[in-house]
Image: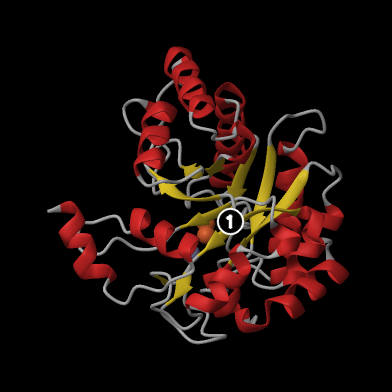
Amino acid sequence: MILGCHVNFTNEQLLGSTKLALEYGANTFMFYTGAPQNTIRKEIDSELTKEAHKLMQENNIKLENIICHAPYIINLANNTISDKWDFSINFLKQEINRCEKLGIKYIVLHPGSAVGLDLNIALQNIIDALNIIIKDDSKVMILLETMAGKGTECGKNLEEIKYILEHVNSKNIGVCLDTCHLNDAGYKMDDFDNFLNQFEELIGIDKIHCVHLNDSKNPLNSHKDRHENIGFGTIGFANLVKVLNHEKLKDVPKILETPYIEEYPPYKLEIINLKNNKFNPNLSTDLKELYK
Ligand code: FE
Ligand code: FE
Ligand code: ZN
């Protein structure tokens, strides 16, 4: 089982993220190279990176399972303000560069939002941008995340993801599933086998390199994108355990992006519950006990 959660990239950079992941009992993790909402970034420190790699090795965390996430404000879909589109492209290039320095193999990207553009034009903009950014010989692979379809988000169904993948010249691109987003986009997570069959037919399961394991606050097809703690949402504990343990995705890292309960990170307890396949309805009380 490769299971972890998103963690901060602290002043100690990747080393700090690794320490947090270990505290939570995770054997993988996902990080942003700075705040997800902005593009202020520090130079990657090679000493801290070395120490992080060493700490991972000592604790059986495989570097190839660690995921980076690009900031939300990158939008490759809309080029009406060409400076902004260029900025997104250049920033993503720099993120890939930072991943290379950190030894990270995968970076998750939200495909983008059309904001006023026709869907087909928006998809073409994403394709054009990715064709500028992606290099065949790069050690870093961009993973397009399946989106909830909130507002004008692209990538809200498998057809759109397939269309982008087909028109990007390089094969150095993959997919990240997000169970909350899939539910909100109208894919039933209580029939995950059926979903995977559909995915296999359209895109190919071998393209999946990360799963965001989240419950959802909202019903099927709601297009909302509000994550819920595991077992407390509309997808439910048993269905998420099935995704986590699915034979066809056993080598794919699963990342929790569930919300804090008050100021407490839920990940340590959620990871225990998922590993034991035992839903704990007292998560909130137990968290307060744990961190008091
Ligand atoms: Fe995401
Ligand atoms: Fe996600
Ligand atoms: Zn989300």
Looking at the image, residue 169 sits to the left or right of residue 21; the answer is: right
Left or right of 161: which side holds 92? left
Judge whether 117 appears above or below 53 on screen: below
Q: Is residue 255 above or below residue 181?
A: above
Residue 152 appearing in the image: no
For residue 172, what is the image quadrant? top right
Residue in view at x 81 percent, y 54 percent: 206
Residue located at (44% from left, 20% from top): 43
Query: Could you say where residue 54 lies in the image, as x and y percent from the top left?
Result: 50, 20
Q: Residue at x 34, y 63 (%)?
A: 259
In percent of width and height, residue 166 lies at 86, 57
Q: Is residue 87 above or below residue 271?
A: above
User: Could you say where residue 86 lies in the image, as x and y percent from the top left?
Assistant: 60, 40
Residue 236 is left or right of residue 172, and the answer is left
> For disc 1, does the CB lie below 8 Å from ligand 1?
yes
Query: Callout 1: few (<14), some (14-19), or many (20+) C-alpha neighbours within 10 Å?
Result: many
The residue pinned by badge 1 equals: 110
- Which one is in front, 291 or 12? 291
Locate residue 179: give its quadrant: bottom right
> Which residue in the rendered view is the most extreme toward the top?
47
Q: How is the image coloured?
A: secondary structure
- Residue 90 in percent (x, y) is at 59, 34
Q: Nearer the viewer, residue 238 or 46?
A: 238
Quarter holding residue 145: bottom right
The residue shown at (84%, 67%) is 200
Tell me the element at label 1. Answer: loop
Looking at the picture, which amino acid does disc 1 mark? His
Task: State the count of labels.
Answer: 1
